[in-house]
Amino acid sequence: MLHAALYGDEDQAVILTYAWDRLLIDPLPGPRGADSFTGLEPVTQSVWSVAAEAQPIAPAGSTLPRLAAEIPHTLALLDPLHGAEGITRQLEDLVSHLAPASIDLLDVGGDILAQGDEPTLKSPLADALTLAACCQVNAPIRLLVAGPGLDGEISPADLRPLLGTLVHTFTAEDVETIGNILEWHPSEATAMLAATARGARGICEVRDAGLPVPLTDEGPTVHEVDLDDAVSRNNLARAIMTTATLDEAEAYSREICGFSEIDYERNKAAWLTERPPTKLDRDDVPSRLDQFQSEARARGVTHTTFRHLTEALNLSGSHRDALRQLLISSRPEQYAAPLWRIPSDD
């Protein structure tokens, strides 16, 4: 979506991204490396592309192969298993191999600008690893923040003074360039970015903890941020620049931020094993949904994601698509694509 908006549809991009889909999609905590897939195709000695024919090796899960089948760009696997040094090598290999006309580092939400001690911070490690690597690559890299505050980790008010030039404001027409991907892809921040571009406003409840995220006119904006300034703010990124393993980077996250997001996933996976989710009962869903919506309205919530709804109704990630189809077919007036609208009492 960003590539089409900024560069048009003619040239293809290489999109380097994590295979880190969280527990609703991937039952294994943490990111997946190249050895977690079959069918990857070599791009360089250290970089592999994810083709539509690639498959995660069970029990791992990943949305990347399906995403690769639906976008016209090359998806390359950002593998953090060798720490920031490994990601730096991957980036340097790609730059040497491709000689790209431009390189953009995109963060949706803005938590890449976190210092590390913010009480609302939930997932600093993935961003810090990428930031630490990008600032060590001998090539100009532009840092872009889309949807300030939409990840629910740093508030828009705190981010506003840190944002630079407005690069673009997404519109409904921009969202159409990605087709129906957000009909199935579970990314909550991207879903809210698309929804705000289509005009959704209010409060959206996300994640398993039900974080309230404001949907405002700032939601569809994209700003440039000075890369060096971001590194100066991000204590974790500076600390992990020479890490050679993910475990080493995780240890710094526990020391600097007080936690590791992979530890959270490990604990949650153990909890889910002890307390398995309920089955999808089509006759029972309407009453449970009504109860959730009544409580959400009392909290001032106007929208939620299907990912959050799945967990709020104590269903497993495998039920997300079926739940979504059931709700849209039974109450189509509440579908504010790609979000679910909580009706008012009126």
Image: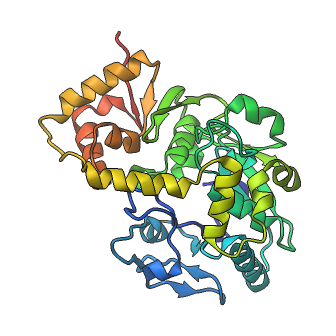
Any part of residue 2 in sight: no
How far from the left and from the top, in percent, is residue 80? 62, 71
The quarter of the rendered structure image containing the C terminus is top left
Any part of residue 196 in sight: yes
Picture layout, residue 342 above or below residue 186: above
Relative depth, front residue between 189 and 277: 277
How far from the left and from the top, in percent, is residue 287? 19, 27
**Number of callouts:** 0
Q: Is residue 70 left or right of residue 256?
A: left
How far from the left and from the top, in percent, is residue 139? 86, 72
Picture layout, residue 159 above or below residue 17: above
Residue in the picture at 53% in, 86% down: 41
Quadrant in the picture for residue 298: top left
Q: Is residue 186 left or right of residue 153?
A: left
Quadrant in the picture for residue 1: bottom right
Relative depth, front residue between 246 and 127: 246
Residue in the picture at 77% in, 63% down: 132
Residue in the picture at 61% in, 36% down: 120
Quadrant in the picture for residue 129: bottom right
Residue situated furthest left in the rendering: 283
Picture layout, residue 133 above or below residue 165: below
Q: Is residue 302 left or right of residue 9?
A: left
Residue in the picture at 55% in, 45% down: 189
How far from the left and from the top, in percent, is residue 344? 38, 16
